[in-house]
Amino acid sequence: MATRVFADEELQRLREFPEISRDELFRYFTLSPTDLAIVAPQGRRAGVRLGLAVILCSLPWLGFVPDKVTAAPPVAVTRLAEQLNVDAAQLCSYGRRAQTRSEHVRLVAQYSGWRAAGAIELKELDEFLLARAMEHDSPTLLFRLACEYLISARVSRPGPVTLVERVAHARNQAQAETYDGLVHELTPQRGQELDALLVVDPSLGTSRLTWLSTGPVEASAAAVKAEVDKLGFLRGLGADTLDISVLPAERRRFLATMGRRLTGQALERRDPQRRYPILLTLLAQSATDVLDEVVQLFDQAISAKLSTAEKRMRDELAERGPPRPSC
């Protein structure tokens, strides 16, 4: 499941140290006096002090600590080494005991007020992701938002595969809740009407879906008539009375945009739980958009007629010449 969002190489990079910017270097890799007291008590070897400092600074920076602490960005290691008055090369000796890193991560988490991602924390993450998934459907965006949420909550980020699985679960749950929220509008007749939008209409030479998604190219009487025809068609389907207020505004915009972007064949291949909410929100949004378009086109057409009439009047007056003086 995770590789559908990230390739194996990307997943591996998500487990490792990324490149660090200058701002991040100074923001996260500056030790306070209290930090120094925790990291460098008397008698602790230089390599251990440096490795512990890397862990202390990496947790708030990344939201987790990579397994290979010695692979931290050299510029960050050098900056910490200068503050600890040790040789940066000493980091190579860190972590010879398998338990060292785990013990130090627990020490840093306790000192910094961070928590492991346990059952309660993951449940809270799922609730956050569901709310975001009702607004956005991009798995990569949801993954990034999840990482930012965990950092703000001071919860150590689980592995990327685990996080991608939580994102996938949230997206599926959002789709199910979307369908459940609109099921009251999905009568058998409406389902047939929605499916008919995807079929080529002989009178148009294209599907009603494409017809509704194609806007006018100019303000003319023909364009006004075409949009009025769309408005009549939409109202005949009851699009102007659809109740989709249960969905967040961002979700409605997202689904309507998908309806305009996807072809009829692509929508036909989707199961009804995904296809019908898209088409319902597209109809509801189109009912509003087309009405606005009719008003705007009518206004533009009237303005053009008035401008033409005014120009003709000015031309006629210019041809007559200035008025003759009266005796």
Image (spheres, helix red, strand yellow):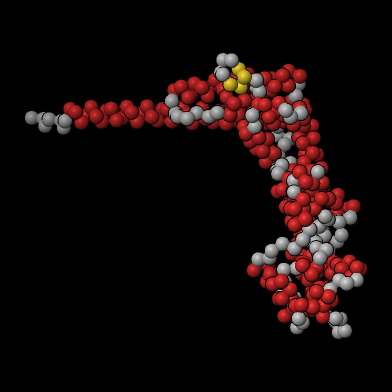
Q: Position of residue 94 (x, y in %)?
A: 84, 73
On screen, residue 298 versus residue 264, left or right, reads left
Would you say residue 122 is visible in this rendering? yes
Q: Residue at x 23, y 27 (%)?
A: 316
| Camera-nearest residue between 46 and 175 | 46
On screen, residue 146 versus residue 100, left or right, reads left
Q: Residue at x 81, y 65 (%)?
A: 68
On screen, residue 288 versus residue 245, left or right, reads left
Q: Residue at x 80, y 74 (%)?
A: 92
Q: Is residue 108 above or below residue 129?
A: below
Q: How many marks?
A: 0
Q: Position of residue 183 (x, y in %)?
A: 77, 28
Give the quadrant of the N terminus.
Answer: top right
Would you say residue 107 is visible in this rendering? no
Residue occupying the far left of the picture: 327
Q: Position of residue 140 (x, y in %)?
A: 72, 48
- Location of residue 263 (image quadrant): top right
Q: Residue at x 71, y 71 (%)?
A: 74
Give the quadrant of the C terminus.
Answer: top left
Q: Position of residue 224 (x, y in %)?
A: 48, 24
| Camera-nearest residue between 51 and 61 | 51
- Location of residue 199 (image quadrant): top right
- Location of residue 309 (image quadrant): top left
